[in-house]
Image (tube, coloured by chain):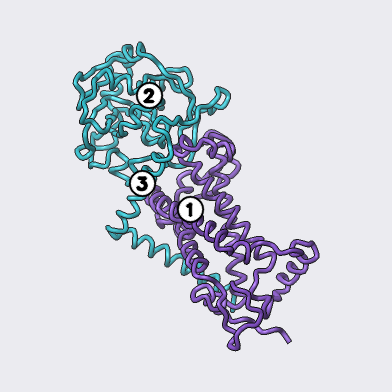
Chain colours: A purple, B cyan
Amino acid sequence: MDSAPLPPPAGLVRRHRLPVRLWHWLNAALLYVLFTSGLGIFNAHPRLYWGHYGANFDHPWLTLERFGGWITLPAHYNLAMSRHWHLTAAPIFAFALLLYMVWGLIGRHVARDLAFRRGELAPRHVWQDVKDHARLRFPTGPAALRYNVLQKASYVGVIFILLPLAILSGLTLSPGMNAAWPWLVDLFGGRQSARSIHFIAAFSLVAFFLVHIAMVLLAGPVNEIRSMITGRYRVPEARP
Amino acid sequence: MSLILSRRMMLLSAGATLAGCDRLARNETFRETLFSAENFHKWAQRSIMARDALAQEFRPDQISPFFRPNGTANPNTPEYKALWRSGFADWRLQVHGLVDRPLSLSLAQIRTLPHREQITRHDCVEGWSAIGKWRGVRLKTILDAARMKDGARYIVFHCADDMGGGRGYYESIDLTDAFHPQTILAFALNDQPLRVANGAPLRLRVERQLGYKQAKYLMQIEAVASLERIGKGKGGYWEDHAGYDWYAGI
């Protein structure tokens, strides 16, 4: 966002630019489809292994019951349909991330809003931020218009580490991609390792989602959600 | 705002959204869109890979201790049992369709053709993988011997396993995969003659695709111009009966 030290009189400012808002809601829908259809696919063989191979007679590091119909897409077990959903959403999701990264780097969203500022990573500053979060003391005034260091770390971590990890580990499950890009399977140390990492990445995203939702609810859901739909955000007034 | 209430709201809305997705998937146009992602993946993968790009091959010490059989473990039809009792001496592989020289090959004849050995990973659509050492004859060798006609676009594999109602398993691949160096008709797994559970006497290996393409218990190979008249027209048993993608590279 453009630096405006003084909020306008009404306290309503432009907070999120259009590409951020579009990508946010596209992601919300796609990740929802990807996660639920992914669980449907996982249900076909709810065991995870490390290494190149792994089947019923090998040793899994994790064995689960099938996920229930309330959280899988489709609601009844249908591997073919789960795959259709997953493989339709996946390329849209991957190319949207790529576009967003390019826009974020060229359009300076990353440099302006997400890059750590001098001193932000100092232990004292980080500790202060942790304490503020723990006490649910959310920033007010102009400080509310910038991401704090924990927010930056989680957004950067998700955009540049977790989402690419999920996409690349997913691509590694494809035998065609293994022939096209053999380095993929080397990167993850085997197809079954990639499947395990894909699963871990998916649940890490769920963890991010839960914290994200909790923060939105605690920080004022109407104001936060409006800012992600219309872009307009009411700057919280300074505490007395 | 009560967090517990909102959690319940989230669960309810998650359920409602999923039900909405399921309803959406019953809409014919939307269904076609979902099913057409296959075309994108096939196009994208074929675009970035060399025509003969090889699937990864492994060292002998990387072979799975036990190669999991899946699908039909024994065709168990009277015809198959009779072939099995004779040690497959009476079994013949019929090669027909759009070929100038239809063939009828015995197992002994196939074993005398030039072999290829490859230690590759079998990836089931369900998610598991097994590594095994296959020995067999390149499909190209067979198709060249049968002198495939110009109009042929797909190779269809007809199998001995009865999938119900007397209908055998069938699968198909296009010529890019048919002539790929690792596409073989395998008669040995891990230096042993192919066991019944793994597809005796002969099975297809098409290494850049998922397990359901690896047709077992081969009886006939047919060169065709179109898949329209094969089964229900989607090119394979699971494609026709369960909605699996014909292109199983992903």
Residue beneath disc 3 = B38
Numbered label attached to residue A63: none
Asked if marks 3 and 2 touch (Cβ < 8 Å), the reply is no
Q: Position of residue B92 (x, y in %)?
A: 26, 18
Circle 3 crowding by C-alpha within 10 Å: few under 14, some 14–19, many from 20: many
Q: CA distance from mark 2 to mark 1?
A: 34 Å
Q: CA distance from mark 1 to mark 3?
A: 16 Å
Numbered label attached to residue A94: 1
Nearer the camera: disc 1 or disc 3: 1
Q: Residue at x 49, y 64 (%)?
A: A23
Q: Position of residue A206 (x, y in %)?
A: 56, 59
Numbered label attached to residue B184: 2
Sequence order check: which comes first, mark 3 or mark 2? 3
Q: Amino acid at mark 3?
A: Glu
Rendered image quadrant of residue A61: top right
Report the front residue among B246 and B166.
Answer: B246
